[in-house]
């Protein structure tokens, strides 16, 4: 399936409450990272941000007690859109901000093998220009420009993409890749 799906209404009240009180609360841990991708030439680009790794792609290990909740988000989206998944590759919550170094993330594809992914905006970023851009395989044409909005889900296949770093405030996104 190669289509891009954007959905603003797939999370239920319990999902939204968990996001608002746990993920956006004061006790949800984030850790600094310097690289947003680990494959390709983009992996050498510094791009400081914070992350909460849920499923570690390096060793296929669950790394967060919140794994069941985030897997349920994927389930809600895939059930609504009649999508199937067999395997989870990576899951994380990424928090980006104006780090004073980069205006945008590198153009990248999350893995060197075919996959699909779901992005879910967890907060409502103050900077609405901190958009996500999905490109064609040759990285020449923008297929979709997505404005961040809390609870918005964006599904797409393994296509090059990047996002604009917020000039102010934070941008918090759940990212999950799967087969």
Image (spheres, helix red, strand yellow):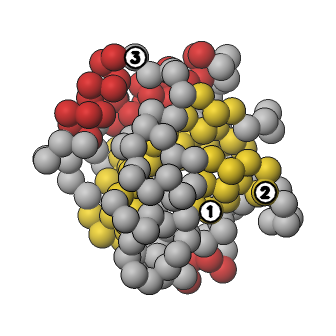
Up the image or down, 178 lies above or below 167; here it is above
Q: Position of residue 73 (x, y in %)?
A: 44, 28
The C terminus sits in image quarter: top right
Q: Residue at x 60, y 72 (%)?
A: 106
Q: Are marks 1 and 3 in contact (CB under 8 Å)?
A: no
Q: Is residue 37 visible?
A: no
Q: Position of residue 89 (x, y in %)?
A: 54, 46
Per the model, the C-alpha gap separating discs 1 and 3 is 28 Å
Q: In the rendered image, which residue does mark 1 sit on?
A: 162
Element under label 1? strand
Element under label 2? strand
Q: In the rendered image, which residue does mark 2 sit on?
A: 142
Q: In the rendered image, which residue does mark 3 sit on?
A: 12
Q: Residue at x 51, y 46 (%)?
A: 148
Up the image or down, 45 lies above or below 8; here it is below
Q: Are marks 3 and 2 in contact (CB under 8 Å)?
A: no
Per the model, the C-alpha gap separating discs 2 and 1 is 10 Å
Q: Earlier in the sequence, mark 1 or mark 3?
A: 3
Q: Position of residue 124 (x, y in %)?
A: 39, 43
């Amino acid at each position: 399936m190669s289509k891009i799906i954007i959905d603003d209404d797939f999370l239920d009240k319990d999902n939204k409450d968990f996001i608002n009180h746990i993920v956006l609360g004061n006790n949800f841990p984030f850790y600094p990272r310097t690289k947003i991708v680990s494959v390709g030439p983009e992996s050498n680009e510094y791009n400081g941000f914070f992350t909460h790794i849920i499923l570690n792609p390096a060793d296929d290990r669950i790394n967060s007690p919140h794994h069941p909740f985030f897997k349920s988000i994927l389930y809600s989206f895939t059930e609504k859109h009649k999508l199937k998944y067999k395997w989870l590759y990576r899951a994380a919550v990424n928090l980006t901000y104006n780090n004073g170094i980069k205006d945008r993330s590198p153009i990248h594809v999350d893995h060197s093998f075919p996959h699909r992914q779901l992005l879910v905006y967890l907060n409502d970023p103050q900077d609405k220009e901190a958009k996500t851009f999905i490109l064609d395989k040759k990285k020449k044409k923008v297929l979709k420009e997505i404005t961040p909005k809390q609870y918005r889900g964006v599904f797409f296949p393994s296509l090059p993409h990047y996002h604009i770093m917020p000039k102010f405030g934070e941008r918090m996104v759940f990212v999950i890749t799967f087969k």
